[in-house]
Amino acid sequence: MRKPKIVILGAGYGGLMTAVRLQKLVGVNEADIVLVNKNDYHYETTWLHEASAGTMHHDKVRYEIRNVIDKSKVEFVQDTVLEINKDEKKVILEKSEISYDYLVIAIGGEPETFGIKGLKEFAFGITNVNSSRQLREHMEYQFATYNMEEEKKEERLSIIVGGAGFTGIEFLGELTNRIPELCHEYDVDFNKVKIICVEAAPTVLPGFDPELVKYAVSQLERKGVEFLIGTAIKECTPEGIFVAKGEDEPHEIKAGTVVWAAGIRGNAIVEKSGFEAMRGRVKVQLDLRAPGHDDVFIIGDSALMINEEINRPYPPTAQIAMQQGETCARNLAALIRNKTDLETFKPDIKGTVCSLGEDDAIGVVFGKKIMGTKAAFMKKVVDNRSLYMIGGVPLVLKKGKLKFL
Amino acid sequence: MRKPKIVILGAGYGGLMTAVRLQKLVGVNEADIVLVNKNDYHYETTWLHEASAGTMHHDKVRYEIRNVIDKSKVEFVQDTVLEINKDEKKVILEKSEISYDYLVIAIGGEPETFGIKGLKEFAFGITNVNSSRQLREHMEYQFATYNMEEEKKEERLSIIVGGAGFTGIEFLGELTNRIPELCHEYDVDFNKVKIICVEAAPTVLPGFDPELVKYAVSQLERKGVEFLIGTAIKECTPEGIFVAKGEDEPHEIKAGTVVWAAGIRGNAIVEKSGFEAMRGRVKVQLDLRAPGHDDVFIIGDSALMINEEINRPYPPTAQIAMQQGETCARNLAALIRNKTDLETFKPDIKGTVCSLGEDDAIGVVFGKKIMGTKAAFMKKVVDNRSLYMIGGVPLVLKKGKLKFL
């Protein structure tokens, strides 16, 4: 009897969790499992704001996939997904093709720029290891260049962060810690540096508890961040951005660095492959399969699930992606054993902690509001938890944030 | 009786040596000594190739002037020289003016670009701390950007070094050590990196012993440097350079980084202030004074002295600048004591060592040819010697290259 072939696309939180759970659930004789990923490493997306600011080296943020998978059960293929051919049940990769019986699409999302002119070309992103270290080096280069110019351009020392959501705020927290180091390294007067956060929504961290938001804003303002709330970026140029509040005429803010940290959409490959999607996200069934495709699971940033309690989609978080990976693995195991009653996915949101730098954070954990060093401690617990869930204690010891021990 | 005022412009090798010798030779009641410098630090110009390549941090290359001068005898003024008014015996600085009875012009040289189009705008220089760290960061940014682009631009990984003189060769030595680190840091394939050295003269290191030159070239070639000798840079653009051999039609070499490491001329301020100069260098008297100006000494890169033995100018080296500083200090002491027989300057060239990286070098010391680790050791001795001459043992212990101990 031919063994079914399970192909997992992507080794982010969702895909890698599916692989490591599946390798425990399924015997060598039950299925062939293939994990496909562009890089030979997994990276902690939720730590990229640190690598981007330069407060943590990017090598700390990633680890080799081969170190966490059981090579006797999971075959790892390093390649880039170009398209999925559902009808022929195969995936077209850059260097080869791969056929499947069951497919897991866990290829992550893409920055959503809402069609704002110039953002794709001129703004930096906190998207992956490559973009994070480019952003880090771009800022260093701006500071290094400042003293070289006879006519000093103070805009070189201005950093605009577009978006006061989770990523934007966490990046600002790291950035305010990094700036004094950059000033020291490049003999730059701290008072000349500007950090401006532009957010179109009427509040910082929409959806967060107002008391916590107030604390976050005052902490970041104290460290030098200027907030422009209810203000939309109309255009990004090589020199900075044009912004407008409400119906006002747009005006220019010059800056050597513009970071776009707002919004994520599903992966374009999903739409390109013929799945019905909204902004690249497929509204999946409760068992995480794509409607009409009993052999295809979609999890993580390209999957859309509605939180019935508030009638809004669940946010694309690492926490949910990993939980989806666990359910997905169990459902795959059921399918290859010809069981028909698949498990229904239900997120179990233990809490949300938003970092404000090394020693400060805000959050709600098990329904309780926390802030300051206590929240910063919880943030490290959360970060270590994702390592533990994928690679157990060895990975936590190797890559974990253990400074508090 | 009014004390004469001695003003020393510049705290490079020549100026700082003049100051530290003078503070020993002259009593507090004999003269007022003022040292003027743009930065509050002195930097080791001959170590800048290391800071530029990124093999040594720029803070290792500089030290605070206040730490080596005797504040009871020398007043330090941090300001930038704009012009010298010989007739009114005063110096116009950016923030103030200062009058003098005796003046030492030791403001260093400027890169000589020989009118080659685009070099000033688009090539990086190994000129000072600011330019060196900008060059270092520029290369890092090129490597960081390479993996971010969907269509890979291999020219981002190409570095052109214009000039195979002392600075060019020493920079290449460090660069070949640095490239593997950059490749590791930015996940770049070492084989895609190109280092090209372009030299208009018919040989590398003109004036050096041919056997040593051959050794240097083969060592650098072995580490991946490609030499284009007898080849002139015709133009530098943001994309690279145009070169031509002899009468050939110029052709383009694309490169993300172009470094101009050839040629130094005197400081434009010298000509601007009305001293008769050739390429910014004043042919000084044997006592180091400017012809026709008994109260003005010119030393270092802006001074021109002919080596009668070969009827060519002495090269602008740290060794000679420091020796000039010593003579200059003694002559100043004589002048303020109303002595008329000033000392004649005669360079005492103990040797020349050209580094090829951390553990390799070539050189001629006390007339003897050396190469390899022995020469690398001698290079560190030379480097430490300049520290010792300015700041004694404490400065050597603080900033010295003591790895060989």
Image (tube, coloured by chain):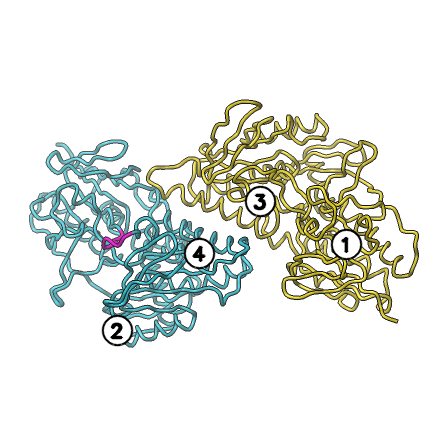
Chain colours: A cyan, B yellow
Majority secondary structure of the magenta segment? Answer: loop
The span from disc 3 to disc 2 (Cα, nearest Å) is 52 Å
Q: Amino acid at mark 3?
A: Gly
Is residue A405 at all visible to an observer of this figure? Answer: no
Q: Residues within 10 Å of mark 3 (few under 14, many from 20)?
A: many
Name the residue that disc number 2 marks: A209
Magenta region, residue range:
A111-117
Amino acid residing under circle 2: Asp
Q: How far apart are the two marked residues, 2 and 1, measured between alpha carbons?
A: 64 Å
Residue B135 percent location from the top left of the image = 53, 46
Give the structural element (helix, strand or loop) at label 4.
loop
Q: Which mark is residue B17?
A: 1
Please name the amino acid that badge 4 sits on.
Gly
User: Which of the 4 image quadrants contains residue B168?
Assistant: top right
Q: Which mark is residue B125?
A: 3
Per the rendering, the mark at residue A54 is 4
Quarter placement of the N terminus of chain B: bottom right
Q: Secondary structure at mark 1?
A: helix
**Of callouts 2 and 4, which one flags the residue occurring earlier in the amino acid sequence?**
4
Task: Give the mark, 1 or 3, whose residue is nearer the N terminus.
Answer: 1
Q: Tell me the residue at 8%/46% (across/down).
A: A339
Residues at marks 1 and 3, CA–CA distance in whole angstroms? 25 Å
Query: Label 2 marks which chain's residue?
Result: A
Marks 2 and 4 sit apart, C-alpha to C-alpha, by: 29 Å
Query: Across the whole image, how many numbered discs are drawn on residues?
Result: 4
Please tell me how crowded label 2 is: few (under 14), some (14-19), or many (20+) other residues with Cα within 10 Å: few
